Amino acid sequence: MLTVFGSKPAKSNYCDGISRRGMLKIGALGVGAFGLNMADIYRAEAAAGTGSNHKAVINVFLGGGPPHQDMWEIKTEAPKEIRGPFQPIATNVPGIQIGECFPKIAGIMDKSVVLRAVVGCEGRHDSFQCMTGWRHSEMRTIGGFPAMGSVLHKLKGPVDKSVPPYIGMKTDGVWRNPGTPGFLGQNYGPFVPDGQGLADMKLNGITTDRLANRKQVLASIDRLRRQVDTSGELAGVDSYQQQAFDVLTSSKLVEALDVSKEDPAIRARYGDGKPFKYKYDGADTNNEMLLVARRLVEVGVRCVTLTFGRWDSHGDNEGLVRHHGTRIDQAVAALVTDLEERGMLDDVTILVWGEFGRTPQINKNAGRDHWTRVSCAYMAGGGMRTGQAIGTTERLGGDAQTRPVDVKEIFATVYNNLGIDPRTTTISDPSGRPQYLTQMDPIAEVS
C-alpha cells in the first residue's frame, strides 16, 4: 500500500519530513504497486508520443466458447438435436433474425454487425487469440505477439498521462487473462485495477494538497535510491516517477472505476447481471463492467478488456444461454445506446466474442462441446457500416457456408477503426525486425 505522509512525522530520516519507512512504501509505486512498472511505462511513452485522436476499443471476451448456433444464426432447418430449443426473432433491420435471448440487441441491429461464420480459431481455452489476433505458436520464440491494447500503448501512448492507455478489468476465475504484452515487454502490459493495484491509487483520506510538493517527494526518493541501489530495492525509480504520481493524484481513473458516481438511470439501463449463475470456474456476468468500460474510455483509456460469464456449456446449454444471453444482451445494448447518446459510438469499437464455437450436436448432458471449425462475433461502433449479418453456416451449423471471416480480419478491422492501417503499420520485435499487426485486410463489408 502506498503511504504518503501529509505532515512531518515526529521522527524523520529526511529534512522534508518523510520517514525512511514511508519512503520505501512510496518507492513501491515505481516497482510494481500497480502490477506493472509505471516509471518504465512513462519512459516508453515519452519516446513514443501520443495519438491525435482518442479512438478506443472495448473487447468483451466470452470465456469458454459461446454456442454460435444459439446466438446469431438459429438453425431452423436442422433436426431438433442440432437446432436446440431456441427460436429466431426479428430485428429492426428487415431480413435479419437473431436468437430469442437477445431482444435488446435485436432493437439496435441497425447499429450492430453480427459475424455468423468466424474461422481460424485455435481451439485453446483462453483469451490469447481474442486479445492478440494470433495463435500461441506464432512468434512464440520471441515472446508471442502482443495484445491489441499493448500495440495501442506502443503506437499511440496515453491520451492523458494520468490514465493508463490499456486496462484489463479484473474478474474471478480462469480464462480471464486481460491480454499480454508479448514481445513488447511488460512496460506495455495492461493495468489491472484490482486489489492492491486499486488500493494504491487511493490516498486514503490524504488530499493532494497535503502532498505539498511532489518534487520534494521525488527528490527524497532519489536520495534514498542512492542509498539502496546496491540492493536493487528501488531499481527503475527516476524522473519518470513524477508521471506515476500524476496517476496517483489524479481523480480521473479512480472515479471512472466507481460506478456509484453514475446516473442511477444509466446504471439501471445496464443492470447488474445478478444473480450470477453458471459461473463455476469462470467469470461473473457482471453487467456493470461494461458500464465501467464506457467510463474508462470516456476519461482516456484506449483499450479495455474484460471477461463476461463462463460459456463452456458441456451441460445444460439451454439454461446457460438463457441466463448469460439475456444479461449480455442488456449490457451490450445499453453500452451501444450509451455511447451513441454521448456522441462516442463512431470512435469506440465494441467487440464481443469467445475463443471458439460449440458442436452442432447436443450431447447426452444437454450441452454442446468444443468446436473450432466455426464461431461467431458481435461488433458495433467504430464508424463501421452496421445493420449487417455477415456470413452463414451450412444447414447443421458445423462449417462456414458463405463469407467466412477470419480472426485476423476482425483484428484488421478493429485496427482500421482505431485509425491504424494494418496493411502498412508495423511494430519492431526484440531483434528490431518490423512485424505487421495482422496478415489480412479489414472486413470489406464494414470498412
Image (cartoon, rainbow, N blue to C red):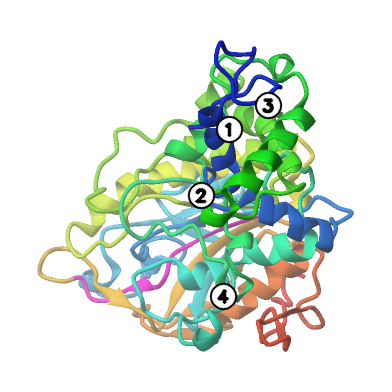
Choose mark 2 or mark 3, whichever is in front. 2
Q: Is residue 306 above or below residue 12?
A: below
Alpha carbon of mark 2 to alpha carbon of mark 1: how far?
19 Å
The numbered mark, 1 or 3, whose residue comes first in the sequence reads 1
The numbered mark, 3 or 4, whose residue comes first in the sequence reads 4
Say which quadrant the C terminus sits in. bottom right
The numbered mark, 2 or 1, whose residue comes first in the sequence reads 1
Residue 442 forms part of the magenta stretch: no
What type is the residue that disc 1 sits on? Answer: Met
Crowd band around label 2 with a 10 angstrom C-alpha radius: few (<14), some (14–19), many (20+): some
Crowd band around label 4 with a 10 angstrom C-alpha radius: few (<14), some (14–19), many (20+): many
Choose mark 1 or mark 3, whichever is in front. 1
Q: Are marks 3 and 4 in contact (CB under 8 Å)?
A: no
Alpha carbon of mark 4 to alpha carbon of mark 2: how far?
24 Å
Q: Which residue is mark 3?
A: 251
* Rendered location of residue 158, percent (x, y): 76, 50
What type is the residue that disc 3 sits on? Answer: Ser
Residue 351 forms part of the magenta stretch: yes
Helix, strand or loop at label 3? It is loop
- Segment tinted magenta in the rendering: 349-362
What type is the residue that disc 4 sits on? Answer: Gly
Nearest the viewer among 187 and 236 is 236
- Left or right side of 170 for 46: right
Alpha carbon of mark 2 to alpha carbon of mark 3: how far?
19 Å
Identify the residue at image location x=79%, y=78%: 425
Q: Which residue is mark 4?
A: 133
Choose mark 4 or mark 2, whichever is in front. 2
Q: Are marks 1 and 3 in contact (CB under 8 Å)?
A: no
Identify the residue at image location x=63%, y=71%: 184
Residue 189 visible in the snapshot: yes
- Disc number at residue 35? 2
